[in-house]
Image: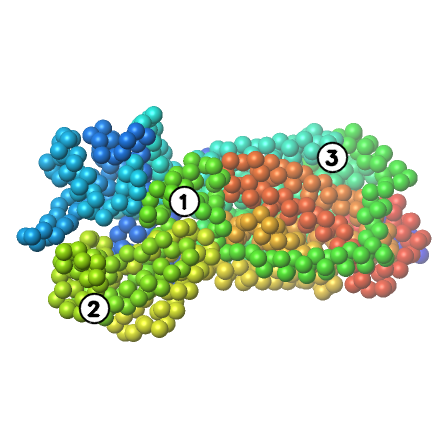
Amino acid sequence: MKNSSVTHHIAHPLDDSEAVVERWVFRHRAVLLLLFLGLSIWLGLQALQLRPQASFEKMIPTGHAYIQNYLAHQSDLKGLGNAVRIVVETTEGDIFTPEFQDILRQVHDEVFYIHGVDRGSLKSLWSAAVRWQEVTEQGFAGGPVIPPSYDGSSRSIEQLKSNTFKSGQIGSLVANNLKSAVIYAPLYDRDPDTGEALDYTRFSADLERLVRDKYQSDTVRIRITGFAKVVGDLIEGLAQVVLFFAAAVAITTILLYRYCRCLKSTLIAVFCSIAAVVWLLGLLNVLQIGLDPYSMLVPFLVFAIGVSHAVQILNAITHEAAKGASRLKAAQRAFRALYVAGLVALVSDGVGFATLMVIEIAVIQDLALAASIGIAAIILTNLVLLSILISYSGMSQGSVQRLKAVEARDRQPVWEGLSAFARKPLAGVSVVLAVLMFGAGLYLSQGLKIGDLDPGAPELRPDSTYNRDIAFITANYATSTDLFVVMIKTSAQQCSAYEVLDKVDQLEWRLVQLPGVQSTFSLADFSKLYMSAMNEGHPKLKGLNRNQSMMDAASIKAPVGLFNGSCSLLPVLVYLDDHKAATLESVVAAVDDFAHEHDTDSFQVLQAAGNAGIEAATNIVIAQSQNTMLLWVYGVVTTLVLLTFRSLRAAICIMVPLALTSVLCQVLMVYLGIGVKVATLPVIALGVGIGVDYGIYIYSRLEALLKTGMGLQQAYFITLKTTGKAVAFTGFTLAIGVGTWYFSPIKFQADMGVLLTFMFLWNMLGALTLLPALAHFLLKPAKREVNESVAQSSAVNTLPSEQRACA
């Protein structure tokens, strides 16, 4: 009786129950097709107008206390935020020649007129604000390092050399070996006239065209560093990213054709997945969000997720066609069987990505929004549009006949072998191995670091032009490019008070004891130099003087930038060997301890400015947000799975493999020396979003077969021949496509390629091996009993009955 009931449902799947969504979609398929066509054209035109963009403010956690301190005093800290350094190096002799100085002056003038440069804060030997000072018998003497009378003569060159040594710029604006000089150019984040964000693409191109290309020669080398140049290089490398994306699309297309052996359905599936990317890019332009270098992987993820769902639909349609269904009926039945599971998977993806919004860094929030928009596009393009297009084109007879031949084989060793994970002893072995790997992973992942683990810009290869330029500055200048600024806030007109400067001096002494700190400089240091200078340079008198008049006199002679106009804020400049996480953590901890000991109403120690200070704040936010983000991702996705399957056992079967992959991915990051930062933090969340698709599809198909009375292993064997085969193909195909990123000249993309390849494969393996093993132990005994007669009857025509159960 039970068998006949099953057979009846198989024979009449559409007559017994009608799905409202499926009926509505296919009843209006012509209208929907025209609507999708018009929408694709419009969004395609919008996508063509999208331009890569980046913002310094979007890269930093503006809500963090350190950044708020910096922004509140930004006007008093000219040049201590977003800036570039242009190094002009001579390969012949030193910088004290008329020829070199002429080149340096021309480069200075070129940089002065580049759009985006804060001209009032531009510094080089040719800046009037860069001055020399000395104590003479008549008192203090000084002036610009390069005086108005400079004419390139031997006498002028000797005067320039003397002034340079007296200026204290050796190691800062002039190299220790006197073979190069720096032009330091602070930047506006927004154009003061238009309010528009700085165009980093244009700015970086201007630096290359107007400076490096124009002045670099056999005798002169140009080196450029700074956030703007990093972003510019990443955007410039976007063309190569597009090439790798195209390679991934080509690889996916070839493998998809070999999988389904139907050219028209392959092209339709790829077209729908690319359409989702086009919709995403078009919507980003409409919403004026933009696409920055750190979210460049989102379009590929959207394409990958689209292909994943397309493969499931093509697989289901081919099975229906093999049973004799017409083009329209095959598409209808496949859509009815899969749209619920597909919709749940995609909603889980979108909501999971949206949880990245808890990280208060605008660039990550933009990435989360972009990924969520892409998922919304996939729901329409790869669930609805794909099914409609296939209902017109159908599957080729070659594809259908090939499937029939495969299904007719007596033995299918791969699927039979994998189905053994649904019963003892392999189920037990799989679970035990998973527990051991999870425990080992948790232990090893404790070595995961927050922030950059390498000097230079880790987004670029170590041998990139930018990182070679950074290495040159580090090797040839006493003051590195990694600057941490501590802000000392006092009462008005009290920044030069002895008590204040004494505390600042104590803070500097603590900081210079730390490994990774090169040197420090502040008004306290200048005041000590002033005291020594006032006493014929006697080294024993190089100290702070309790005579307040003397301290006030020293502050009057201090260079611009050592305190603000109201003498209520003075920066302490801390030059670091690098911006590695450990270096920044030690500096932050030391300053925090000092502030805890010495802060009063009239003396406050505030962190932090400078590129290293801003990065320290970013690392703190990421460290605080990392676990919160993961809890939100897993909490939201688990809740959606629970609401869909209404079973805690189902949620465990689907989510545990994802959790194992996340932990192992963190271990891989430790092994590869990849820190958790703005560029890498979203990867784990995105990996969960992709992986949950595999589990939902497999469990949905498995549950449908179990409801017919099948035993677990038999049901899983049939699941593997349909959904499991598609999951395995998707995992391998996407891993191969993204694996090509390893050869990208952009290290950030190469790292993402390695991590995503790992997550594609492990999520696939977890869904195919660990999920059935957990099901063996967690599903109710009644569902694990093998009813051979029902199993044999259901095996003849499982897919329609399963589709009806899913619907």
Query: Height in image: 785 above or below 803?
Result: below
Q: Which of the two marks, 2 or 3, is nearer to us in this view?
A: 2
Name which of mark 2 and mark 1 comes first in the sequence.
1
Taking the spot 24% from the left edge, 36% from the top edge, the residue there is 108
Q: Secondary structure at mark 1?
A: loop
Identity of the amino acid at label 2? Tyr
Q: Position of residue 7 (x, y in %)?
A: 88, 50
The amino acid marked with disc number 3 is Tyr
In this rendering, the answer to whether 92 lies above or below 27 is: above
Give the distance between the C-alpha atoms of the residues marked 3 and 1, in whole angstroms. 40 Å
Nearer-the-camera pick, 334 or 82: 82
In this view, the residue farthest toward the left is 138
Q: Is residue 713 left or right of residue 38?
A: right
Q: Tell me the tag on residue 498.
A: 2
Mark 3 sits on what residue? Answer: 259
Q: Is residue 249 above or below residue 506?
A: above
Q: Position of residue 340 (x, y in %)?
A: 69, 52
Residue contact between numbered discs 2 and 1, judged by CB atoms under 8 Å: no
Mark 3 vs 1, N-terminal side: 1
What is the crowding at mark 2: few (fewer than 14 residues within 10 Å), some, or many (at least 20)? many
Which comes before the other along the chain, label 2 or label 3?
3
The vertical placement of 211 against 531, above or below, is: above
- Quadrant in the picture for residue 428: bottom right
From the image, tell me which residue sits under label 1: 54
Q: Residue furthest top?
A: 218
Q: CA distance from mark 2 to mark 1?
A: 44 Å
Q: Is residue 440 visible?
A: yes
The dot on residue 616 is none
